[in-house]
Amino acid sequence: MAASRAPALRNIIISASEPCLRGVQRRWAQVHDVRFVATHRQPDRVLENYKEKLEKKAKEAGVKDIHELKEVFKDKIQNVKKSTTPTSTSPFPFPPPPPPPRIPSESQPRPAAQASATKNPPGIKTLSSFIDIPKTLDLPKKEIELIWRLRHASDPQSLCATIPHSTYQKIEATAHRHPQFILPLPREGQGAEIHFLQWTFPSPTTTTILFTHLAEYKLRGEFSQPHTTVTHHLDMAGPKGLVLLQGNVVEGRGVSVDEGKWLLMCLQKFYGVGDEKAERKRLLEQFSHGDGNFKVETLLEEAEKVP
């Protein structure tokens, strides 16, 4: 009888004690702010490593302990922190433009002889990779323009044009002062898409413009892939007064050839302007200097104006 009552008694004791156990249960797990752990444990570890040296320095300075030593050198510590903290006042998420290279004098066009003596960096196509320069120099200007267009007619992704040297000089002078800018590309029913452009000057006879989606450039910076590349060849600027333009729109990068042409035309609106287009000039200045008054709405208005 006693043996049969023992299990039932144990059940009664356990069931009766459970609420009490739950009432006094303690949980010792702690929740730490990860940001605090990441930013405060490292300085503590550094303090431990240099504790003996700091105590020695405190005795030499005639103070009681490390805390008083920190108070003595408080101003100096703050000055060091300020000098090593990077600051940026530009409202634009772009790296600062490179220092402008020397602007060549307009009265001194680059001779063709200098062109042949200068080697372009790897990956940059020279004019000689498209046409025979010595033979082409013997031709009239109109024939050179025709040959240049026919040379690129078979490539559906190509861009080509010929520019009078006097017009190009104005564009290049502006490019040296403003090597980076943004341009809008209208999308039907979607407003406008913003594209980032950057000028490079790889050799005395070539200048290159890289067009990239602004969103991609903000994400990847210098590792972003341009969708359109345009190169100006100046080999015939002196003897013929012509600058030959050649470019390529990469297929599958979200920009069509016609849209690449529109961006190129828009670039000429801003970089080929004189004092008569003061608003466009002001936009270039504001963008280059990180002026907070730069407005994309004004950029859109100026880009849609003709010319």
Image (tube, rainbow, N blue to C red):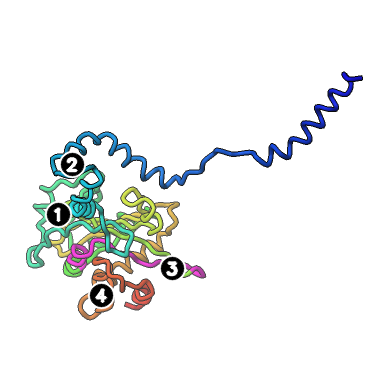
What is the spatial separation of the Cα atoms under label 3 and label 4, in whole angstroms?
21 Å
Of residues 85 and 197, the one drawn nearer to the viewer in this rendering:
85
Is the C-beta separation of discs 3 and 2 under 8 Å? no
Q: Classify 10 Å Cα crowding around label 3: few (below 14), some (14-19), many (20 and above).
A: few
Q: Name the amino acid type tagged 1.
A: Pro
Q: Which residue is mark 1?
A: 204
Above or below — where is 56 with respect to 9? below
Q: Name the amino acid type tagged 3.
A: Ala
Q: Name the amino acid type tagged 4.
A: Arg
Q: Earlier in the sequence, mark 1 or mark 2?
A: 2
Residue 173 covered by magenta stretch:
yes
Is the C-beta separation of discs 1 and 3 under 8 Å? no
Of residues 176 and 296, the one drawn nearer to the viewer in this rendering:
296
State the SS at label 1.
Answer: loop
87 with respect to 107 (left or right): right
Q: Earlier in the sequence, mark 3 or mark 2?
A: 2
Q: Name the amino acid type tagged 2.
A: Ala
* Quadrant of the rendering where the N terminus is positioned: top right
Task: Identify the disc placed on residue 71.
Answer: none
Residue depth check, mark 1 versus mark 3: number of the one nearer the observer = 3
Q: Earlier in the sequence, mark 2 or mark 4?
A: 2
State the SS at label 4.
Answer: helix
Above or below — where is 178 with respect to 248? below
Residue depth check, mark 3 versus mark 4: number of the one nearer the observer = 4
Task: Identify the disc placed on residue 192.
Answer: 3
Q: Which residues are magenta?
A: 171-190
Residue depth check, mark 4 versus mark 1: number of the one nearer the observer = 4
Q: Classify 10 Å Cα crowding around label 4: few (below 14), some (14-19), many (20 and above).
A: few
What is the spatial separation of the Cα atoms under label 4 and label 1, in whole angstroms?
28 Å
Q: Which residue is mark 2?
A: 58
Q: Is residue 191 visible from the viewing direction of this image?
A: yes
